Image: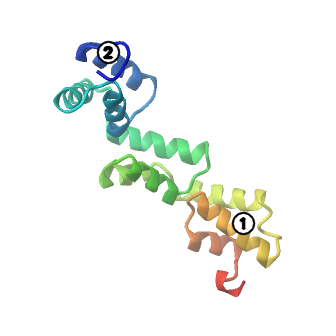
C-alpha cells in the first residue's frame, strides 16, 4: 500500500464516508483519494459503489452544488463551470443539471454587477476590451458580455 499507515478497504471506506459527508464530492475526487491511499482496481471501485449505494456520493448532487457555489461565491460564468466539471469527468447530463441551478436573471445580474464593478460601463473602448477578456476568463460568454457592454470587436485593436 502506498500510504504509511496501512488501511484495510473497510477502514478506507469509513474514511471516504467522512470525506464525502464533509462536502459534496465527485467520483473522480474519491477515486483519486482512494488511489493515493493504495486502493486501485476492484477494491477502489467497490468502495465507490458502496458510497453511491449508501448516498454518500451522488454526481448529480455534486454538479448542482458545485455550479451553485462557483457561481454565487466565485462569480464564475457557465463556460468555466462546465470546463471544470468536465475536467472532473462529470457526465454531460449532470453538467446540464448543474448549470440549470443558475437562473438566467441571476446570471445576467451577476454579469452586470461585475461589469459595473470593473468600471466597464464608462471605460474607453480599449479598457472595455480588457474588461471583456477578464470576464471571459471568468467563464462568461463573449456575446453576452458584448451585449451588456457594447464592446467593439477585438480585431479593431
Q: Residue at x 31, y 13 (%)?
A: 6
Residue 100 visible in rendering = no
Q: Residue at x 36, y 20 (%)?
A: 3
Number of numbered discs visible in the structure rendering: 2
| Residue that label 1 marks | 131
Colouring of the image: rainbow
Q: Is residue 52 left or right of residue 137?
A: left
**Front residue of this view, candidates 30 and 63:** 30
Q: Position of residue 152 (x, y in %)?
A: 70, 82
Q: Is residue 150 left or right of residue 104?
A: right
Please say if 138 is above or below 129.
above
**SS of the residue at dot 2?**
helix
* Quadrant housing residue 13: top left
Disc 2 packing (10 Å; few <14; some 14–19; many ≥20): few
Please say if 46 is above or below 100.
above
Disc 1 packing (10 Å; few <14; some 14–19; many ≥20): many
| Residue that label 2 marks | 14
Amino acid at each position: 500500500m502506498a500510504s504509511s499507515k496501512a488501511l484495510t478497504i473497510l477502514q478506507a471506506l469509513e474514511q471516504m464516508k467522512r470525506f464525502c459527508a464533509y462536502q459534496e464530492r465527485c467520483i473522480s475526487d474519491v477515486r483519486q483519494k482512494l488511489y493515493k491511499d493504495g486502493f486501485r482496481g476492484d477494491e477502489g471501485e467497490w468502495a465507490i459503489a458502496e458510497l453511491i449505494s449508501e448516498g454518500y456520493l451522488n454526481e448529480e448532487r455534486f454538479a448542482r452544488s458545485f455550479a451553485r457555489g462557483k457561481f454565487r461565491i466565485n462569480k464564475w460564468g457557465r463556460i468555466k463551470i462546465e470546463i471544470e466539471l468536465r475536467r472532473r469527468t462529470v457526465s454531460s447530463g449532470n453538467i446540464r443539471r448543474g448549470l440549470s441551478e443558475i437562473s438566467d436573471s441571476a446570471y445576467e445580474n451577476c454579469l452586470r454587477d461585475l461589469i459595473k464593478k470593473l468600471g466597464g460601463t464608462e471605460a474607453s473602448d480599449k479598457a472595455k476590451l480588457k474588461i471583456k477578456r477578464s470576464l471571459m476568463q471568468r467563464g462568461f460568454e463573449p456575446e453576452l458580455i458584448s451585449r451588456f457592454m457594447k464592446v467593439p470587436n477585438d480585431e479593431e485593436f
